Image: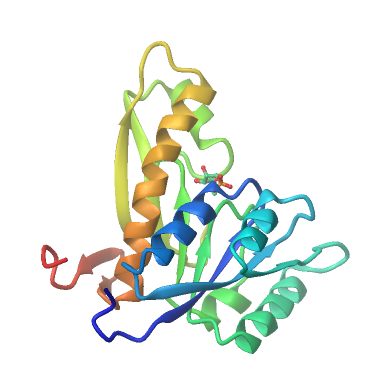
């Protein structure tokens, strides 16, 4: 189980349906990750992630961005995080760009998942970008968040073939399956303090001993 490791307190930020949130909830509940999701925050009132949090008895907030600058919004978020003694943050389909206010408060403690093999196809509609570009392989990336969008040091990538018959929907669905494997793996490594970041490169302490 947790080998006596201290449980990290995790906040997940999500804007939508929250399937990655669900994968993280299930993985942490199994007790294989020394982490507990204690807070879910969304910037959209209708985010399904809120319902998933409630179903799992996790404290959840909708924080409206209306009328706030990015820095003001993130300052409020930071207060929630500090009030809840959050150690780690996982962005799971959170469609806002974080400001340095948050990133500097949590250096190398924020993970993001993106549906492409970064640095290819950052930004919105990564799966559509991959199809339109004509790549034969794409996938997903879990990375640490730095001050550039979809850019920080890469923790895990998983590949997915692109088929001639793929549509944006079929490709997205196959990538999503891999996201649900990659994200819990990455959170586990971060929660176990096993990520060694040297510049852009991330090395895994004691790789192969899990
Ligand atoms: C996921 O495919 C995730 O990789 C993507 O949003 C989706 C959220 O799905 N994130 C980004 O594109 C971030 N740049 P979910 O709400 O079901 O987890």
Residue 59 vertical placement versus 160 (above, below) = below
Give percent across and percent down for residue 99. 63, 70
Quadrant of the drawing holding the C terminus: bottom left
Please state if 66 lies on the left or on the right of 206 as rendered.
right
Residue 75 vertical placement versus 20 (above, below) = below
Give percent across and percent down for residue 58. 61, 69
Instruction: Find residue 202 and report its image quarter.
Output: bottom left
Q: Nearer the viewer, residue 137 or 3?
A: 3
Is residue 118 in view?
no
* Colour treatment of the image: rainbow
Residue 134 vertical placement versus 129 (above, below) = above
Give percent across and percent down for residue 167. 50, 18
Instruction: Please give the name of the residue rendered at 50% of the width and 51% of the height, measured from the top-left corner.
Output: 20
Please state if 3 lies on the left or on the right of 125 as rendered.
left
Quadrant of the drawing holding the N terminus: bottom left
Which residue extends farthest top?
165
Count the marks. 0
Instruction: Please give the name of the residue rendered at 53% of the width and 56% of the height, measured from the top-left corner.
Output: 21
């Amino acid at each position: 189980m947790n080998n006596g490791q201290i449980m990290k307190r995790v906040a997940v930020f999500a804007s939508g349906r929250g399937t990655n949130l669900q994968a993280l909830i299930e993985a942490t509940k199994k007790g294989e990750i020394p982490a507990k999701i204690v807070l879910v925050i969304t910037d959209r009132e209708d985010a399904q992630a809120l319902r998933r949090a409630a179903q799992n008895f996790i404290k959840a907030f909708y924080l409206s961005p209306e009328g706030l600058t990015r820095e003001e919004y993130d300052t409020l978020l930071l207060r929630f995080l500090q009030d809840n003694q959050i150690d780690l943050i996982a962005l799971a389909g959170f469609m806002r760009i974080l400001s340095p206010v948050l990133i500097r408060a949590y250096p190398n403690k924020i993970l993001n998942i993106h549906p492409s093999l970064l640095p290819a196809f950052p930004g919105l509609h990564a799966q559509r970008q991959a199809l339109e570009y004509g790549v034969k392989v794409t996938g997903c990336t879990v990375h640490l968040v730095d001050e550039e969008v979809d850019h920080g040091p890469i923790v895990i990538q998983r590949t997915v073939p692109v088929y001639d018959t793929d549509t944006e929907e079929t490709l997205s669905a196959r990538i999503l399956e891999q996201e649900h494997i990659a994200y819990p793996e990455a959170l586990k490594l971060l929660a176990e303090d096993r990520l060694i970041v040297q510049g852009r490169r991330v090395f895994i302490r004691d790789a192969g001993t899990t």
